[in-house]
Amino acid sequence: MNRNVKAFLDDVWSQVTPIYEKESERIGALKNRIRLQAGVKDYLRVSWKQGKQSGAYGMIYIDLDEPFDWSDSSYAVEAGAYIEDLMDLTDEALLDELFSALHSQVDAVFQSDQYGPGFFDYRFELILEIQRGNSTLRRQEVLINDNKLQGLKKALDTFIQTKVMAELPVRPSENDEFFFARHLVNPLFFEQERDKIDPLIRRLNEKHRANRKRLDQWAYHYTNAFRGWAEDHFLKRYFDRKGNFGAHWVRKEDAELLKPEQKAMDFFLYVALQIGHKEPATRKEYLELAKQLGSDRADGYLRQGSGRYEGLRQSSLFQGKANDILGTIDIRIGAEEETAYREALDYITGLLQEGFPKGYKLTLKSKAKNYLPIKKLAKSQLHQFFANSLQYPALFPRLTEYAEAAMEEFAWYMDVEPGEKSAMPGTYAVFGLGLYSDAYFPLVCRYMELVDTEHQSVQDGYAEAFMEAHGLSADLMPAVVSILLGGNQSAKPVKSMEINCSELADALFQELEAKEDYQREYVLYRIFGSRSKLAQRVKKEEPPLKDNLEKLLAWMR
């Protein structure tokens, strides 16, 4: 080995060795090793740069983990005089000499168990970068430990049989699912075809169906894995990333000469559709990019949807268009009358009953602009459509049918950007019906039992609107308590609600008696604000109201 090359590598290993030794101790002490992870370390980048802040011979920068674009966490060591001799070599000779020696040393360590069996992954990315004037010389190679690769394949086969395909109650751990999702899009483990991947995705979806938290976590893992595959293994071949943080994909100049193989395009379209369940905007972006690459199927998805649903229905009074791939429904009301809205409701409800995405986005063309008198609700076109429909009492049964088809826990309409205005499917119809008639109180209660009180808050303003519409009486207390319990965890007390007679206080007590302690306290907080405020009320009131309020006070901490 050239003595200058050896001196360069000695400086590199002077930084790497103590860190690897320390990391080896940490990794070796880890308990419950993950079966689908061959090892932890999989990256090393060595860079030499000459800069104003560097020493006379520049600096060597070492990254032991793949850095984020915005990070600057490299280990650094000042290079020695050997750099001058190395720089006398030609570009090709310099890269050949340095990379060959670096590769030899790294591969020897990587293929061994010097730092323990769980230290290195089966795959290791090695990068060398040398600054040369205004440009950077670069060489990169991926090393493979075949023994670890074969061992991981066996572990993966066993995992599928014993954890994925096994009957309930057997489930994989969340950590295993993180790595499993990434292995699914690794061509070393699976053919990148829908028929190979989709059955495994669906199997775990089905196993987690009764556990929403696990289902969402699994969807999060495979969505991220699919996005990583789409960007790193497909899109980068045909597009460059431009704009702030590489937010936009721009077709490469020579991309006309690059045509994706049909197999790769088919898998990319599958990935786009899967991502769309959690990230509709990403799905649309990917389909538009696929269209740029000449995919007729992507163009069809964007224009017409999958073809599984009735994409167009029209009459002399209304027109409806639906695209399940984009999750959109477009309604145009030709005449502001009951029949037009009946036809539109029938169309939308029919789509949902056939399996159309419940968290759709609706665009509306209508002269009427009604909205429900409920604070926090977004004044979207979807809201407007249902408020318009609620102007016709004869349509209430159809609105009920729609609400029953639409309501789904942990789902949200796409009529607004995700946030505090997000609403569960069925929200506008249910809220409106509940304001008009007590016949729909059971529907309101079912909604409040179903709504995700952790991630949705638009229902917090419903209690006030409900009491403005119906007042407050003892026979309304079951519905009122249900509405209050459906509030968000950070909901504030209802200003317009006052327990001002013994009948109301007794009805409240009777309704809360069968509830859990935390439910009682939450409802009482939303009515009285705090224990101290309720205690003040108790002091001021006279029996029998005083006695009933004291019973309620005993439930507040």
Image (spheres, helix red, strand yellow):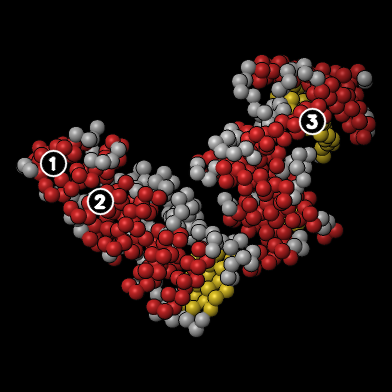
Rounded to the nearest angstrom, the CA distance separating label 2 from label 1 is: 17 Å
Q: Which mark is residue 478?
A: 2
Residue 315 vs 478, above or below: the answer is below
**Going by the picture, which residue comes out furthest to the left?**
542
Q: Earlier in the sequence, mark 3 or mark 1?
A: 3
- The residue identified by callout 3 is 150
Element under label 3? helix
Instruction: Classify the position of the C terminus by image quarter.
Output: top left
* Front: mark 2 or 1: 2
531 sits to left or right of 287: left
Earlier sequence position, callout 2 versus callout 3: 3
Q: CA distance from mark 3 to mark 1?
A: 72 Å
- Extreme bottom residue here? 316
Residue flagged by tag 3: what amino acid is it? Gln
Query: Disc 1 residue type?
Result: Asn
> Could you say which is closer to the camera, residue 183 or residue 441?
441
Lateral position of residue 544 relative to residue 292, left or right? left
Seen at 45% across and 61% down, the residue is 405
Q: CA distance from mark 2 to mark 3?
A: 62 Å
Badge 1 is on which residue?
A: 548
Residue 106 lies in quadrant: top right
